[in-house]
Amino acid sequence: MFLDFAPLEGMTDAIYRRVHRATFGGIRQYYMPFVSPARSLSFTNRQQFDLAPAQNAGMPAVPQVLCRDAELFADMAALLKEAGYSEVNLNLGCPSGTVTAKGKGAGMLRDPAALDRFLDQVFARSPLPVSLKTRIGFESLSEWPDLLRIFIQYPVKEWILHPRTSREHYGGSSHRRCYGQALEAAPFPVIYNGDIFTLSDYQAFCAEYPAAPGIMLGRGIAVNPALAQKIRGGEALTKDALRLFHDRLYREYLKYWPETAVVGRLHGIMAYLCQALDCPESVLRALRKSTRAEDYQEAACQVFSQGILRDEIRFTPP
Ligand SMILES: Cc1cc2nc3c(=O)[nH]c(=O)nc-3n(C[C@H](O)[C@H](O)[C@H](O)COP(=O)(O)O)c2cc1C
């Protein structure tokens, strides 16, 4: 069963992906956080950097597009093809209110007939194979049978399914039986995504769905960057590896970003990584409060020297 790294907007950019791959193994491919293209197909500097072939050389990275217009999607896919990508992922799962209010992401699941027309055009026009990342409904589970029937009609490269409705965000437990139904009904690979945070979560999932071709891991790797490596039979996370990962990230971001921006980005990354450590609250507070680079570095040093690696590392919602 292969393991993919989920897109985590605001975190898993090209630099993060590269440093992760240089430090830990176990990942088949990395999905890039979504790009929501404007009709002009103009991009911010950061988006251009993230998508640039040079920043992704040798990386199995799949770009993701968030879009409700099939023509725009096809134009974006053509650009990505030109840039050397061989697959494009369509985001039909983002539950953020600002996204769904525009009828994008999981907002597209609200109107199955319109979704069907959109997908018909997407698959007719895209110059690249299209994979999907979806949820199982917008408001309620009752929408699922209709959505399942629609998705399985298309020549989908791979379908990544996070079995929650948009309304559920990340709350409650995922509706795994919907994943089982998709796995059985779809003529293409269906990849499971959601709440696999530890080796035992993985083993329990495999026991339940031995026919699953793969799993996408998100917050579990954000907390334990060695999770996929460990699942694949490699080394479990060590404090040295965690520190090396952090230090490499800091150095690599510093090559491209001003130091204050690097500190800001590292705060977001450390909010996850610190969950791997049992660390005095005062030390964590000093890290959170640090804004100047020297203060951040001193605080991070304390986190790594005083923190003790937890026996069981698992993501817990903040
Ligand atoms: C901070 C954050 C950013 C995310 N950004 C994206 C994104 O850009 N595209 C996407 O398809 N999903 C995004 N997701 C959803 C994750 O890819 C994944 O589906 C979700 O975290 C559930 O998987 P997990 O339980 O393994 O974390 C994001 C999730 C989080 C927490």
Image (tube, rainbow, N blue to C red):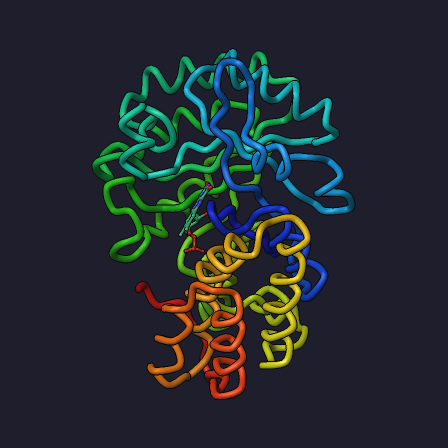
Residue 254 drawn at (x, y percent): 63, 56
The quarter of the picture where the C terminus appears is bottom left
Residue found 50% across the figure and 60% down from its top: 263
Residue found 45% across the figure and 50% down from its top: 193
Among the 4 quarters of the image, the one containing residue 316: bottom left
Residue 172 drawn at (x, y percent): 25, 57
Among the 4 quarters of the image, the one containing residue 135: top left
Q: How many marks?
A: 0
Task: Decide: is 240 above or below 123.
Answer: below
In this view, the residue in front, 5 or 189, is 5
Task: Decide: is 25 above or below 174.
Answer: below
Residue 32 drawn at (x, y percent): 57, 42
In this view, the residue in front, 125 or 185, is 125
Residue 272 drawn at (x, y percent): 44, 65
- The answer to whether residue 207 is seen in the rendering is no
Image check: 196 left or right of 22?
A: left
Residue found 52% across the figure and 49% down from its top: 6
Image check: 74 left or right of 82?
A: left
